Image: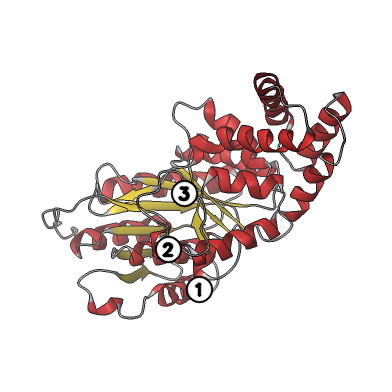
Amino acid sequence: MAPRPAPAPRPSAPTTITAKAFGARDDDPEPEVDAAAEPGRAAWLSRLKSGLRKTGASITQVFVATRIDDALYEDLEAALLQADAGGRATEYLLEDLKQRVRRTAAKDVPAIKGLLIDALADLLKPLEKSLVVGEHTPTVMMVVGVNGAGKTTSVGKLARHLVEHEQKVLLAAADTFRAAAREQLAAWAQRADVPGMSARPRGQVEIVGQEGGDPAGVTFDAVTAGRARDCDVVLVDTAGRLTTQLHLMEELKKIRRVIGKAQAGAPHEVLLVIDGNTGQNALSQVKLFDEALDLSGLVITKLDGTAKGGVLAAVALWSSERPRPLPVYFIGVGEKLEDLQTFRAREFARALVG
């Protein structure tokens, strides 16, 4: 049966998805957390620092030294490598740091720590970008990643952010063969519902799925339904795929092509969810998924476990050599809906350095 013709696009201004729902200020170009103005953000940042404590402790230990010398830089190199920054990013950061020390004529070790935060924040800054929806109706987002990275959980949390911004969201349960995958997504969709939001003209979540069905077919139906139902966003939750298994990656490519058939120009975002505990393997995942699917953004999860976090420096350096930077839209530190927050480079640099 031929798909229903889509209604004429509803005119709307693009919406920037920020941490506004949890207290961020719109007029702060480079936000610094104010516990009074951003209580939710401040509590979340405390959990981020706690999650990265292992990394922070190893780096902070370097700065107990009493003087700036080769031994300090050697210890810092070891600490950055231990934090999974990787060889290239570590070399880049150390050279940048030495240049900053020369420019500022820094004489004491505590000043070096501040300069390292500056160097890391500047490296990470191109990854800091807000997610924008509304330029297309609907905006179609395809979410991918390996098994266990937290894709479905992240889809539910993303839905919450979107609903908080009064977006009408449709979830495509394209992970059709994993047991109870649709039920898990439905549970997150229910949790993403905001009290009082159902009375508003927008700001709601729907779900399309078929257990055991063809993932590409489910995706096509979902995008078509999203257009017909005047949805703002369609979020496609795909099955976990190992980058080493080519036939599985080919299925993701097929889903991407089918989305384009359901809506010209879609998907508008291809988001890779990465487990923050995977270290340098995360960079390998980024490269391989990007080669196959042309990624548009990253979501980093589970930074509250044994995550070292330094791999973001490696991702940032690799991203700087890409035709366009690959942003980190969100990072997560827990299972609660509010535990997924927008990425801010300086916040992360401070949490990582300790």
Residue at image coords 53%, 59%? 151
In which quarter of the view is residue 235 placed?
Answer: bottom left
Q: Nearer the viewer, residue 66 or 165?
A: 66
Q: Give neighbour class at mark 3: few <14, some 14-19, many 20+ (Cα, 10 Å).
A: few
Q: Is residue 273 left or right of residue 136?
A: right
Amino acid of disc 1: Gln
* Horizontal and vertical percent position of residue 251: 47, 48
Cβ atoms at labels 1 and 3 below 8 Å apart = no
Amino acid of disc 3: Pro
Secondary structure under the numbered disc 1 in the rendered image = helix
Marks 1 and 3, Cα distance to the nearest angstrom?
A: 34 Å
| Residue for badge 2 | 23
N-term mark: 2 or 1 = 2
Dot label at residue 302: none
Amino acid of disc 2: Gly
Cβ atoms at labels 2 and 1 below 8 Å apart = no
Residue 89 visible, this angle: yes
* Horizontal and vertical percent position of residue 307: 71, 53
Marks 2 and 1, Cα distance to the nearest angstrom?
A: 28 Å
| Residue for badge 3 | 31
In the depicted structure, whether residue 349 falls above or below residue 21: above
Q: Nearer the viewer, residue 255 or 351?
A: 351
Residue at image coords 38%, 46%? 269
Marks 2 and 3, Cα distance to the nearest angstrom?
A: 11 Å
Specify the color scheme: secondary structure
| Residue for badge 1 | 184
N-term mark: 1 or 3 = 3
* Horizontal and vertical percent position of residue 276: 65, 52
N-term mark: 2 or 3 = 2
Q: Give neighbour class at mark 1: few <14, some 14-19, many 20+ (Cα, 10 Å).
A: some
